[in-house]
Image (tube, rainbow, N blue to C red):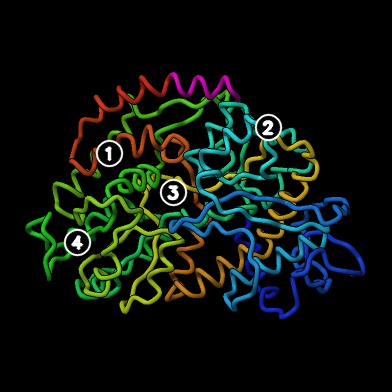
Amino acid sequence: MIIKLLAAILAVLMLTVPLAGCGGKGDIAETASATTTAPVETEPTVTEMTDNLPEADYDGREFRMISYETVNCNGIHVVAEQTGEIVSDTMYEINRRIEYRFNIVLKEILNADLCLTNMRNSILAGDDACEVNLPNDLSTFAFVQNSLVHNYSDLSYIDLGKPYWDASLNEKISINGQHYYALGGFDLSHFDYTHVLVFSKKLIENFGLEEPYDIVEEGGWTIDVITDYMKAVVNNPDFKVAEDGDIYGYDATAKQVLPNFWMSCGEFSIRKDADDRPYFAVTGNEKFTAVFNKCFEVLWDDGLWFYTTVGNNTVPELPNHLESDQVLFGDSTFHYVKTLRGVDADFGLLPYPKWDEAQEAYYSRVEGGTRFPLVPVTVIDTDYVSMIIEAVACENMKYLLPAYYEIGLKGKIARDTSSESMLNIIYDTRTYDMGDTIWCNDIRDGKFADMFKTNNRNLTSVAASIDTVMIAKLEQAAEVY
């Protein structure tokens, strides 16, 4: 597993010399651009992670990526200068390394309109706008549906079996065994969108509760256990009225609650059959119904949820609630938890709970919004594009992920060694539901977000209405693939 590689890689990040690559040239003759400095060649620290790409010289050719900025993740792929921040500086070194190795110039075009919507018209018009487009997963399928992007099986240098591609997540997003997009080292936003529970260590101490780390390690961290924890501290008689002195069990926005728990309990709104064809998996699903009902009973009936109607990805009040000892658990992500660095309160990090102890593993949700590298059909030289994608994916997973995870996340956010261990569990159990991501507008945001916000528990009726729509959409998706 990649986690086991991180410690071995970490020392490399502390070197003052530029990074060694996943492959490369011998002696350095000149730079690929005015900003490219010749990296010092060293032996790779982890020889198992290599891209095995041939040498190539593209004579200063541009490699254009179209993406967009967002507050929900770090969507930048090209860094122009060093700033002293470890993740940014590591990305800078990787950018320069790739440019030198292939004699190219990496160019990032930040344009949300072009990336998410107008790119379809651009491709249909035959425009040579980019080598890679990076829309969010909610927008991705429209490109595939309209035959606007290359199948990864036609990209000769991309090898999804390599460790810098995420096999477990990519298994969730294939259809009919095909990939027109994939998750891995090329873009790390799927790490940013990984959900995590933040908990108040002060409230744990004040109410004489056991720190939950050992419970997690022993496999006993279940939805019933977390419910008991919340019930022990909650003091919110008015429920919907936030006042000084109120203590809440759980901070999360309405759209996040149900998918956080249905996925942590091992359920998915979209599953796939033996032929890798997707189907809507809620209708008639007793386990999904039980998780759904439990969330309402615990968080609504027992008044444990901090009621909020905001549509943000996280609750804006969470930092203040932690500092004022007003919430026991809070929903966050690998990206947003970094905003808690300045919180003057002692907090820990946990995975979301299992359904029961019989559940074999924890599951940590990767929310919709992550980027997929799409290669437009207007790209003729797919060898060139696939070679650069593969090389960047290898370099990023080998060097950028440890900077992001070991230093940027664990080193700066985790306030005790137990939280570091929890982060390892969360990292290793990340999972993905296409009804929370690719078809989010039909399922999660389309129905379930409003259901929880308005305390609508009529799952049978809502599931039937979704089923009617999704049968046609998912059958069409299977045919497209």
Please report contact status of discs 2 and 1: CB closer than 8 Å, yes or no.
no
Q: Quadrant of the N terminus?
A: bottom right
Q: CA distance from mark 4 to mark 2?
A: 55 Å
Q: Quadrant of residue 36?
A: bottom right
Amino acid type at mark 3: Arg
Amino acid type at mark 2: Gly
Q: Quadrant of the C terminus?
A: top right
Q: CA distance from mark 1 to mark 3?
A: 16 Å
- Give the residue at x 42% y 58%: 333
Mark sitting earlier along the chain (4/2): 2
Q: CA distance from mark 3 to mark 4?
A: 23 Å
Mark 3 Cα-neighbour bin, 10 Å: few <14, some 14–19, many ≥20 = many
312 versus 124 height, above or below: below
Mark 4 Cα-neighbour bin, 10 Å: few <14, some 14–19, many ≥20 = many
The magenta stretch is 472-481
- Give the residue at x 61% y 36%: 122
Q: CA distance from mark 1 to mark 4?
A: 20 Å
Left or right? Give the position of 37 relative to 248. Answer: right
Query: What residue did someone put label 3 on?
Result: 365
Indicate which disc residue 292 carries.
1
Mark 2 Cα-neighbour bin, 10 Å: few <14, some 14–19, many ≥20 = few
Query: What residue did someone put label 2 on?
Result: 126
- Give the residue at x 51% y 20%: 476
297 versus 89 height, above or below: above
Mark sitting earlier along the chain (1/3): 1
Q: Nearer the viewer, residue 123 or 102?
A: 123
Q: Nearer the viewer, residue 1 or 454?
A: 454
